[in-house]
Image: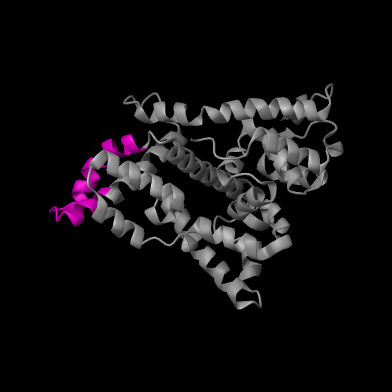
């Protein structure tokens, strides 16, 4: 069991320990959407003041406000901006019923929390990391341009998270399509608004799109991004998702204290040596240690355990 170092147990074989932790973590992950949905629907904010809940609610309301404003503008409603602000909360509450949107926004909130914690504890910059700096200085012009675009996108993400906002342009294409369908179901005839929103989207230039392009362009060198002190949280999470065969949302969730078995297995499945994984744990979760015998866990076994547990999106 992955526990605080001072209380680590070593009686059971490492795979059995990790499997039990993985199963428990996946059960907990399965409750994210229903529990978070319940918290967001609560009118008694005094009982649920947790930063993550507030951040998720506010980001979803910002998504709602943007859609409502475009819709109001297509209908030539006077004071479209104020109309959107006035109706964002109830409309956002309806959008929040979608587990896929909840999981995505929850992952962004967790990523921000992790990034902020890493900056405070290890002086890891929220925007410019050593890896990105080296890519910006690359001789390959296309690599350097993509890295520069990512730098700007990461700066925008940081500012948006400080304001608890989520621009529509930052939603993945499939999730935007799904959210627009929900928008139409709730509001009615929104074809003009949907067309305007879709025409303004370019997933390749979104932060997540740029992160994927940067790690893909690195090829085998993407393994270098698995050092969070070198790559920063954003590239670390994207590379870990790509190299371990998991969704980015699941990887982000694995950085939580109840998901550490998945984090350890994911890093091993991605090809890191146990000693390298220990260094990442020292940075991400310094109070927790790997279980006794983890050094004997093979890469293929870690990958199999991850695959059998399922690393896709838990929402329907």
Using residue 184 as the reference point, say whether residue 288 is left or right of it.
Answer: right
* Residue 136, quarter of the rendered image: bottom right
In the displayed structure, 149 sits above or below 306; it is: below
Residue 214 appears in which quarter of the rendering?
Answer: bottom right
Would you say 132 lies left or right of 2 here? left
Left or right: where does residue 243 sit relative to residue 196? right
Q: Main secondary structure of the magenta part?
A: helix
Residue 69 lies in the magenta stretch: yes
The answer to whether any part of residue 163 appears in the image is: no
| Residue 291 picture location, percent across and down | 79, 31
Q: Residue at x 19, y 47 (%)?
A: 83
Q: Quadrant of the N terminus?
A: top right
Q: Is residue 267 visible?
A: yes
Q: Quadrant of residue 253?
A: top right
Q: Is residue 231 magenta?
A: no
x and y percentages locating residue 72 in the rendered image: 19, 51
Colouring: one colour
Q: How many numbered marks, from 0 up?
A: 0
Pinpoint residue 311: horizontal percent, then vertical percent: 62, 39
Decide: is 12 above or below 226.
Answer: above
Q: Give the magenta range.
A: 68-95
Q: Quick one: which residue is furthest to the top in this view?
A: 11
Instruction: Give the residue at x 53% y 63%.
Output: 150
139 shown above or below 15: below
- Name the side, left or right, on which 138 lies relative to 113: right
Q: Nearer the viewer, residue 283 or 185?
A: 185
Above or below, 60 against 193 in this view is above
The residue sitting at 81% across, 29% down in the picture is: 14
Residue 13 horizontal/vertical position (percent): 84, 26
Q: Nearer the viewer, residue 111 or 268?
A: 268
Q: Residue at x 63, y 44 (%)?
A: 246
């Amino acid at each position: 069991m992955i526990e605080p170092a001072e209380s680590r147990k070593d009686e059971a074989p490492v795979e059995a320990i990790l499997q039990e932790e993985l199963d428990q973590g996946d059960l907990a992950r399965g409750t994210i959407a229903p529990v978070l949905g319940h918290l967001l629907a609560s009118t008694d904010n005094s009982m649920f003041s947790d930063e993550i809940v507030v951040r998720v609610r506010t980001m979803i309301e910002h998504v709602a406000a943007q859609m409502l404003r475009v819709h109001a503008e297509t209908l030539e409603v006077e004071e479209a901006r104020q109309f959107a602000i006035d109706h964002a909360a109830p409309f956002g509450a309806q959008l929040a019923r979608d587990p896929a949107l909840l999981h995505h926004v929850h992952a962004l909130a967790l990523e921000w929390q992790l990034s902020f914690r890493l900056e405070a504890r290890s002086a890891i910059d929220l925007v410019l990391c050593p890896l990105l700096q080296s890519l910006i200085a690359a001789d390959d012009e296309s690599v350097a341009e993509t890295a520069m675009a990512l730098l700007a996108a990461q700066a925008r993400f940081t500012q948006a998270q400080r304001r608890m906002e989520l621009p529509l342009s930052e939603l993945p294409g499939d999730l935007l399509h799904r959210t627009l369908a929900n928008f139409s179901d709730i509001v009615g005839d929104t074809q003009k608004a949907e067309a305007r929103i879709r025409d303004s989207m370019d997933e390749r230039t979104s932060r997540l799109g740029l992160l994927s392009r940067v790690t893909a362009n690195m090829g085998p060198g993407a393994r270098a991004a698995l050092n969070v002190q070198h790559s920063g949280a954003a590239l670390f999470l994207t590379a870990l998702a790509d190299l371990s065969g998991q969704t980015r949302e699941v990887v982000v969730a694995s950085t939580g204290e109840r998901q550490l078995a998945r984090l350890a297995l994911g890093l091993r499945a991605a090809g890191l040596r146990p000693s390298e994984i220990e260094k990442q744990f020292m940075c991400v979760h310094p109070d927790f240690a790997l279980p006794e015998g983890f050094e004997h866990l093979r890469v293929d076994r870690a990958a199999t355990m991850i695959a059998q547990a399922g690393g896709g999106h838990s929402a329907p």
